[in-house]
Image (cartoon, rainbow, N blue to C red):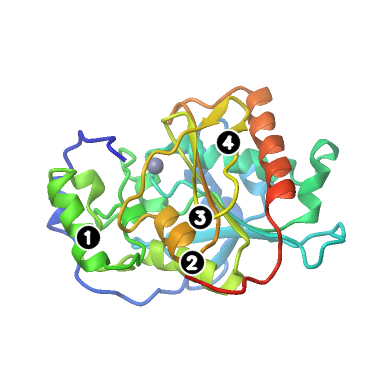
């Protein structure tokens, strides 16, 4: 994606630690409010009460700086006649400076049991609204994590060790906002997302970004044409991106939602429309059948 080429986080590059450090574990449960205080202070239109009501729990994994990677798992409550419920992995904020990408996921968590979106109850959800907490909570929010790595270039796509550094140097002109890391899955946050994909085996992955105001889709199957005002517009395939890894390598459809503004939320009606269109698209296009082959 030829975007965000500005930026001056060069100093981060020198702080990048080599190799894969194993996922550290949080010392123990803390009251959710403690995590929600900094998140609500930083995220547009997410109050402390909304954050607490979202019932996120610590997954056990933590960010580079030790912030818990929070998630909520919601099993299906309605029966799907087609077999086991469709599993949806919904993540927000893999780029820490795209604040609305986290806020809208909090809003959608609040709608999970709303009568207007009952279809949501047919699905089995794993939801993580803030997968790059260190980027979000930095003094000035950053796209990259605390190691200066673009987590959405750190997934183990084929030939990563050649293509990811080459793409970074040649195409992005070594943009520090797009540094892919020194090795695939070098970062605790990307490892955690990777592990969710391995363990949960989602039928579809939905990842929310901003501010390009489009939908993108990777993988086989029918792309969504429109969620709310967002129209399908293929933006490209990048070494190490989640779309590339999940959609093209693992053959799991990956929907990338790019909200139109990274700081200012869409109106409530649009937030609901995107959610409703997303549920309708999943219901019509994603099945829970066991895959016969994985690329
Ligand atoms: Zn992004």
Quote the CA–CA distance across marks 3 and 1.
20 Å
Quote the CA–CA distance across marks 1 and 2.
18 Å
Q: Residue at x 48, y 57 (%)?
A: 247
Residue 274 locus on image (x, y percent): 64, 33
Determine contact: label 3, label 1, CB under 8 Å.
no
Residue 56 locus on image (x, y percent): 62, 56
Answer few, some or many: residues within 10 Å of disc 2's Cα (few below 14, many 20 plus, some between 14 and 19). some
Q: Is ligand 1 closer than 8 angstroms to the Cβ of mark 3?
A: no
Badge 3 or badge 1: first in the primary sequence:
1
Question: Is 24 situated left or right of 36 in this image?
Answer: left
Asked whether 73 or 3 is in front, the reply is: 3
Quote the CA–CA distance across marks 4 and 1.
38 Å
Q: Element type at marker 4?
A: loop
Q: Residue at x 61, y 22 (%)?
A: 267
Q: Is ligand 1 closer than 8 angstroms to the Cβ of mark 2?
A: no
Q: Which residue is mark 3?
A: 219
Q: Residue furthest bottom?
A: 22
Q: Which residue is mark 1?
A: 163
Quote the CA–CA distance across marks 3 and 4.
32 Å
Q: Element type at marker 1?
A: helix
Q: Which residue is mark 2?
A: 250
Badge 1 or badge 2: first in the primary sequence:
1
Quarter of the view holding residue 228 = top right
Examine the rendered structure and indicate whether residue 79 appears above or below residue 206: below
Residue 49 appears in the picture as rendered? no
Q: Residue at x 30, y 52 (%)?
A: 150
Q: Element type at marker 2?
A: loop
Circle on res. 46: 4
Determine contact: label 4, label 1, CB under 8 Å.
no
């Amino acid at each position: 994606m030829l975007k965000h080429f500005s930026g001056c986080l060069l100093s981060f590059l020198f702080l990048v630690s080599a190799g894969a450090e194993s996922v550290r574990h949080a010392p123990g449960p803390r009251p959710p409010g403690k995590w929600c205080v900094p998140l609500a202070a930083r995220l547009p239109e997410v109050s402390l009460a909304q954050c607490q009501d979202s019932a996120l729990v610590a997954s056990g994994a933590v960010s580079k700086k030790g912030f818990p990677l929070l998630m909520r798992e919601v099993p299906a409550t309605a029966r799907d006649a087609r077999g086991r419920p469709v599993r949806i992995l919904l993540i927000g904020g893999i780029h820490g400076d795209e604040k609305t990408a986290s806020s809208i996921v909090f809003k959608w968590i609040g709608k999970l049991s709303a009568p207007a979106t009952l279809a949501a109850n047919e699905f089995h959800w794993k939801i993580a609204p803030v997968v790059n907490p260190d980027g979000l909570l930095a003094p000035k929010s950053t796209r990259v994590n605390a190691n200066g790595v673009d987590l959405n270039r750190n997934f183990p796509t084929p030939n990563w060790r050649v293509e990811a550094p080459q793409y970074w140097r040649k195409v992005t002109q070594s943009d520090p906002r797009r540094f892919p890391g020194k090795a695939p899955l070098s970062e605790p946050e990307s490892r955690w997302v990777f592990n969710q994909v391995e363990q949960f085996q989602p039928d579809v992955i939905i990842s929310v970004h901003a501010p390009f105001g489009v939908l993108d889709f990777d993988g086989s199957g029918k792309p969504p044409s429109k969620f709310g005002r967002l129209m399908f517009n293929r933006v490209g395939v990048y070494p190490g991106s989640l779309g590339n890894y999940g959609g093209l390598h693992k053959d799991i459809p990956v929907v990338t939602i790019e909200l139109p503004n990274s700081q200012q939320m869409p109106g409530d009606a649009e937030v609901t429309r995107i959610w409703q269109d997303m549920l309708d698209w999943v219901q019509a296009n994603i099945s829970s059948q066991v895959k016969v082959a994985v690329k």
